[in-house]
Structures are given as C-alpha cells and as structure tokens.
Image: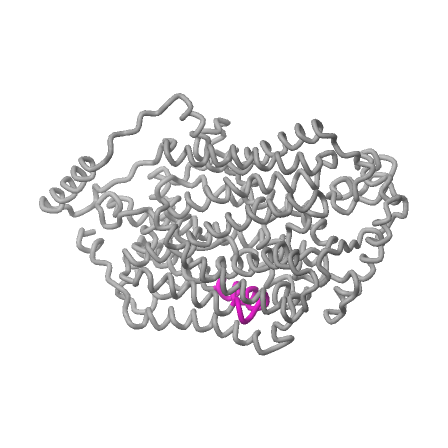
Amino acid sequence: MAQDEFYNVGLFQAWDYVILAGMLSVSAGIGVFYAFTGGRQKTTREFLLANRDMNPVPVAMSLVASFISAITVLGTPAEMYLNGPMYWLYGIAFIFTGLLTSLFLPTFYRLGVTSANEYLEKRFNRPTRLLGTVLYLLQMALYLGIVIYAPALALNQVSGLHLWGSVLAIGIVCTFYTTIGGMKAVLWTDTFQVTVMMAGFLAVIIAGSMNLNGFSEAWRIAGEGGRLDIWDFNPDPTVRHTFWTVVVGGTFFWGTLYAVNQSQVQRYLTCGSEKTALLSLFIAIVGMIIVVTAACISGIVMYANFADCDPLTMGYVSKSDQLMPYFVMYLFGKMPGLPGLFTSAVFSAALSTVSSGVNSLAAVVGEDIVKSIWPNMKERTYTWITKGLALFFGLLSIAMAFVSSQLGSVLGAAFSVFGMIGGPLLGLYTSGMLFPWINSAGAFVGTLFGLTWSLWIGIGAQIYPPSSVKPPLSIDGCNVTMETMTTVMFDNLMDASTMEPPVERPAIASLYSLSYAWYSCAAMLMTIFWAFIFSFITGANDPRNVNPMVISPIADRMYCCLPESVKRPLRCHVGELYEEDPNYQMDKVAGEEMKVAYSNPGYIGQNSPTCIGCAPSLFHDEHQTDASSKI
C-alpha cells in the first residue's frame, strides 16, 4: 500500500465523539440509578459490599474488567505485534491462578472481612495489617495513574483526541458513578464495559481480516513473520517470555491480583455464599481467557496488515502503545463512528479498572485507618466518610496520571508495579494462610525483606534494561519515496546523536536481567523464606494454638475424599488446643450471626459483618466437632 495511505489515517469525527459520549453517559447513568434505588447507598454494607447478595455473573464480569483494562486493550496487541505470541500463554496461567485463588478465598469469606487487610490483624497483629495497608495504597495509586494516562496519551497522538481532556473524562466520570452508586454501580458498569471492550476487539478482528481476504490469510502471514512460534521451553529465567516464565511466573503474578488484592477480594465478598463466590471466580477465569485471546488475535491481525510496512519503523507512531489506535484509525478512519467504538472500548477498560480501585481504596482506608481511630462512629457518618474517600481517591488517580507520564510502556509499567509490590503482599498472605509456624515478627520482617529485594531488582532493571530478542519488522512493502527515506534516515541520525552514551553495565547488572514475569514469584518466595528465618529466631508459633479459621483449609480441599485419620496429620495439628482459648466460643457465636446476616441484609448483630473488629466464623458449624479437625 502507498505510504500516504498508511500515514493519513484521519482524525476523530463528530459521530466518534457521539458514541464516546454515549458510553460515558451510560456508565454515569448506572451510577445515578443505584444512587436512587435499593437502599440508596445509606450503609457501608451496601456502598462497599452491595449488600452481599450479588449474582455471580456481574461479579465475574467485574473481576474480568477490573484488571483486564487498557493494559490489555492497548498493550497486548502491541506485545503480539512486536514480540510474538508468548503472551498468549497467560491464558493457561489464568487457570492455575483460579486454583491458587480458591485456596485463599474461603478464609476471607469465613472471616467476613470488608478489607482483606483485616485478615492480617487476625492472623498476626496490628502493625502487620498497617504494613499491608501501606503497600496496597502505594500499589494502587501508581497503577491507577498508569491506567488513566497511558490510553489517553496513545489516543491523543494517533486520533487527535485531547490528552488531558481524555484524562479528565475518564477520571471524573469514574469518580462520579463510583461515589454516588457504590459497589453495585461498579459491578454493573463493569459488566457493560466488558461488553464494549469485546465489541471493540471483534470490530478490529473482523475488519482487519476482511482487509486481507480472510482470517486464514492473516494467520498465514503471521506465521511467516514468526508471530506464531509459541512453544519455547527454555528454563532460563532471564529470557523475557518462555513457557515456564509466562505460565509459572504468570500464575503468581495474577495471583497477586486475584488471590489477595483488595479490589478482587471485595468482589468475592459481595456474593451471598462462598459457593457463589467460587462460581464467580471460575466464570471470571473463562472470561479472562476469552478477552486475552481476543486481544492476542487482534495483534496477529494487526501484524498481518502491517507486515511489509511497519508504522513504528517509519515513524508514523512514536511508541508501541500507539500501534493499536493507529491500526483502528487505519481501518476505520473514513467510517464515522467506528473509531469512536474502539475508543469507547479503551475508555471502558480504563473506567472499569479505576472504579474498582477507587472503591477498594475507600474500603481499605475506611476499615484499616478511619475505624481504628474512631471505632464507635455512627453508621451513617461512616458511610459518608467512605463516599468522601471514594471521591478523594478518584481525584488522586487523576493527579497520579501526571506521575505516570514519566513511565515507559503501559504493559511493562503495569507489570513492574504489580510485580514489585504485589509479590511481597502475596508472600505475606501466603505466610499467614499456609504456614502456621510463621509469627507476626517473621511476617513483618519477611515482607520488608521481600519488598526491598523486589524494589532493588525492579528499579535496577529500569536503569539497566535487560535485552530481548524480537522477531524482525519490515518496511519493504512501503511505497517509500526518496524524500520519505531521507526524512526517516535523518530522524534516526538525530535520535542517535541526541542519545546519551550507553551506560556501562557493572557485573551486578546481570541480576537485573530476570524476566519481569518472575518478579511476583521471586518476591513471594523471598518473603516466605525470611519470614520463616525470623519466626524461628524469635520463637515460631505452635500450630496447635493457632486459630484454625485463619489458616487455609488446603488439606480438606485437596484431600477431601481421604479418611479423617489421614487428613489430621496433613493439617499439621493446627488448632488442636485452640478450643481452650476463650475467643473460640466468641468466634462460634459470631459464626451463627454471620449466617443470619448473609441471609438478611438488614440484620445487624453484635458480631455481624458490619461490626468492625469482630472475627465471625462459619467454620465451627460445618462437619466436625473435634478441635483437631477444624480446618
């Protein structure tokens, strides 16, 4: 195709703005609807947890939307285009992530927490809970800035959509419907927004395939260009993407999100029962596989269209995150409304993630900080404070977009943030749920050591970026005039002349070559290792005295068909002496009230889920009465 056909892809037209405005209006309208229906968000139970009576389908769609965001819509197709298909293997990792999460979810659910960090205080102590709170706030504040800024920048430079106008549109609309509509608005807008995202992907796949006389032709071209070589079993952890890196490392990366991240845990707790929560999780895993598959296929189709004339090499776009918007304008630039549909998909992805993050941040600060300072606060006052917190964090996310402008690509930046901070958090929760010997001192120090290690590696990798081998890109098919070639060569020479001399790599820089996909797993293992060391130095817990409600019932879930005589030693004697603790009877009463509270949203008892600081337990009513069989 001619060079001018590639370059002159057009800008936004009136119908594109109409469709984009329509999507934003629907999202805001859902918030208004839930502000004036039901309980009208007058209690924190409704505002933060949707009265704990949600259907699994909108919960599952929200789980998909929360972190399959603009990172996927823009970053994944660009990843397929530039680096090949290994990212697709995250679809396998999602399956193992679901199994990993199913080990954590029952513990959160039985304790009836609102903030996931409440678990840390019940299992360890108050300082450990505050450490988890601080890390979560840091993690989400950085991430939400990326989610807002990156798509706005990419769309601005390709379609002409105003950069800070886009940032403000995403931030303000999201803050509005989250603040007035609460968790129900978040869940249902996420469901709507996932639909818009899929519509955007399907439009690109269909139009891009038709441009090449069918998807089979696109697949053939991608295969010839090395974009379908997916089975690389190299065990080297420094290789950016291999089967083991993506599947094993990816399992723990996504585990930091789905197993212990407040934004996701809060969604599980909106369900009316543990079985419903698990059902929503597994529906979400299927949904994530479908969405990521659509994103990867979009990347394949995009490569097939540009296989002989790479717009990045030619300078038509300046960053990889702009490839997908450029492709959309190339396909639909002369079709009013269709660019607006894809832009709505990008905005929907950003809105879903930011709304989930804002609501979860309000819950964490409210439960972990505000309630600890004013424990006897009236329910109505506390509800207004949580709404104010949602408003504050929505505005903070807009401000963090300015910080994000200093980061690199959207995909790499997001994975680095979650890998560096999420890994130690996953290690902290894993230490508590799976290792009863670890005490509070060990958990606290181990988390700090894991965080120090992950920040050291992550920041070092930014200073000394690891190299990676990429499949080739071509401009052989471009209709390049002498003037154009001269311009490209001049730009390349100018870039080379203005570049700083390459930084000399010290010997320790080889440590920073670890693939980003291993950050979470490595940080988690580092946290657990040091947690064990310091626990035994300071006096490890006796598992017999540990409350069985704070330990994951992994033995009973994995070996449910084995006789009790076999399962008992597999529980490591956890809780055998706990019945002697006076708190045991209080937990038992709390469990009875929890059952009543879940079936009756209006019930408020002494130990109901609306009671801050209580430790309700459903476990004691299940099957066994013997103290040694209570996990």
Relative placement, left or right, of 140 versus 607 is left
Q: Nearer the viewer, residue 389 or 491?
A: 389
Task: Where is residue 499? Give x, y as percent.
Answer: 23, 36
Magenta run includes residue 67: no
- Answer whether residue 315 is visible to the viewer in this image: yes
Relative side of 294 to 424, left or right? left
Taking depth in this image into account, of 128 and 566 the one nearest to the observer is 128
Q: Which stretch did the figure color magenta?
A: 178-195
> Quadrant where the C terminus lies?
top right
Q: Is residue 554 above or below residue 73?
A: above
Looking at the picture, tell me which residue is in the foreground, 370 or 406.
370
In magenta stretch: residue 185? yes
Q: Is residue 509 left or right of residue 606?
A: left
Q: Position of residue 517 (x, y in %)?
A: 49, 37
Q: Residue furthest front?
A: 373
Question: Residue 471: where, in percent of width, then height?
Answer: 34, 36
On the picture, is 364 further left or further right than 79? right
Residue that protrudes farthest toward the left in the picture: 482
Where on the picture, by quarter, is residue 503? top left
Report the label total: 0
Can the viewer see residue 248 in this picture?
Answer: no
- The overriding secondary structure of the stretch rendered in magenta is helix
> Residue placed at 54% from the left, 37% from the top?
451
Q: Position of residue 483 (x, y in %)?
A: 9, 46
Q: Residue at x 90, y 48 (%)?
A: 625
Q: Does residue 187 sit above or below 256 in this rendering?
A: below
The front one of 49 and 515 is: 49
